[in-house]
Image: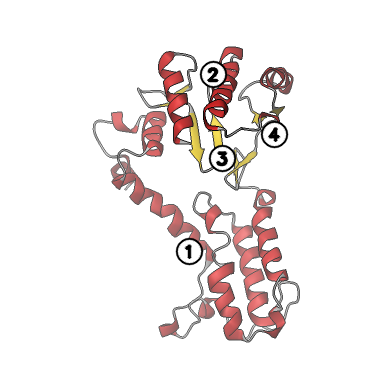
């Protein structure tokens, strides 16, 4: 993947591809790579798409790693599906439109809509179906809640502010599992959730409130922004919102 990245960068330097130019002298983005997942970005033009496909073929010849173009998707921002279809035929891949999944998250999806959180709901149900939960003691259920159920939505919580109903629904599943050993059957809740979610030294079970977890994970980005000056994501935010040009003042100082 490092070799592929170098090839795309060299092509960008040579003018074969242009990538996406961010405003205010920000970075030029041509690709994002993570393990075997890749997104290549550029201007909406036939020459750009054809050159990208040529680079991928050269990469295959050099490395022996073949990227399956037939299973790849082409997306166009601000263009119609008919035009995307024509361009996809030129590249030999499939036309598609946002939202789409990348690294398990939906890109360009409205995360204020409950339906876009269904993967988290389904994961909750799928994980619990694999265990004979009704045979566990309440201590065993607490361990499963801490190690599994509370960690399942963290990947989404790290990037998105969850709607209140999502928090309530997920916590309702946790409560049902805690007191009844099942997320389908409702039984008597012997202690209020606020008490259960307290620290053990305060008489609780040490479980977490999901809205607190969500807020904490999102707040970490403020710290990352202040401490990671050279990271690509920070430079893109600065460029898009022109934060570095506001009289030398740090954007988080303005907010505070």
The answer for how far apart the CA atoms under marks 3 and 2 are is: 21 Å
**Residue drawn at x 65%, y 82% as measured from the top left:** 179
The mark found on residue 71 in the picture is 4
**N-terminal of the two: label 2 or label 1?**
2
The residue pinned by badge 3 equals 37
Q: Residues within 10 Å of mark 4 (few under 14, many from 20)?
A: few
Query: Splitting the image into 4 quarters, where does residue 9 fall?
Result: top left
Find residue 176 and report its horizontal and vertical position in percent. Answer: 67, 75
Q: Which residue is located at x 50 percent, y 70 percent?
A: 208
What is the CA distance from the residue labelled 3 to the residue labelled 4? 12 Å
The residue singled out by tag 1 in the image is 212
Could you tell whether 90 is left or right of 58 in the image?
A: right
Q: In the depicted view, which residue is nearer to us: 22 or 33? A: 33
Q: Which badge, 3 or 1, is on the more N-terminal residue?
A: 3
Query: Cα distance, mark 2 to mark 4?
Result: 21 Å
Label located before the other in sequence (3 or 4): 3
- Nearest the viewer among 110 and 95 is 95
Sequence-first disc among 1 and 4: 4
Task: Tell whether 146 sits left or right of 89.
Answer: left
Distance of label 1 from label 4 (alpha carbons): 40 Å
Which percent across, then down, holds residue 256?
31, 48
Real-space CA distance between mark 3 and mark 1, rounded to the nearest whole angstrom: 31 Å
- In screen coordinates, is 95 left or right of 142? right
For mark 2, what is the residue?
43
Q: Position of residue 169 (x, y in %)?
A: 65, 64
Q: Secondary structure at mark 2?
A: loop
Looking at the picture, the colour scheme in use is secondary structure
Say left or right for 162 vs 88.
left
């Amino acid at each position: 993947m490092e070799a592929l990245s170098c090839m795309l960068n060299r092509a960008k330097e040579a003018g074969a591809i242009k990538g996406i130019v961010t405003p205010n002298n920000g970075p030029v983005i041509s690709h994002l790579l993570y393990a075997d997942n890749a997104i290549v970005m550029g201007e909406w033009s036939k020459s750009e798409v054809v050159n990208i496909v040529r680079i991928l073929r050269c990469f295959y010849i050099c490395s022996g790693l073949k990227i399956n173009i037939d299973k790849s998707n082409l997306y166009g921002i601000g263009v119609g599906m008919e035009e995307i279809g024509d361009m996809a035929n030129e590249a030999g891949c499939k036309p598609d439109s946002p939202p789409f999944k990348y690294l398990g998250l939906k890109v360009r999806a409205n995360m204020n809509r409950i339906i876009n959180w269904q993967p988290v709901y389904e994961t909750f149900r799928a994980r619990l179906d694999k265990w004979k939960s009704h045979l566990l003691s309440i201590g065993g259920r607490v361990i499963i809640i801490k190690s599994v159920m509370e960690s399942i939505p963290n990947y989404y919580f790290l990037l998105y502010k969850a709607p209140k109903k999502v928090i309530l629904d997920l916590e309702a599943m946790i409560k049902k599992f805690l007191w009844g050993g099942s997320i389908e059957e409702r039984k008597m809740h012997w202690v209020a959730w606020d008490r259960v979610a307290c620290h053990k030294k305060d008489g609780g079970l040490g479980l977490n409130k999901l809205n607190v977890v969500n807020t904490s994970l999102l707040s970490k980005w403020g710290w990352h922004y202040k401490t990671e000056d050279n990271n690509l994501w920070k430079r893109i935010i600065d460029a898009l919102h022109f934060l570095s040009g506001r009289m030398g003042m740090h954007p988080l100082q303005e907010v505070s």
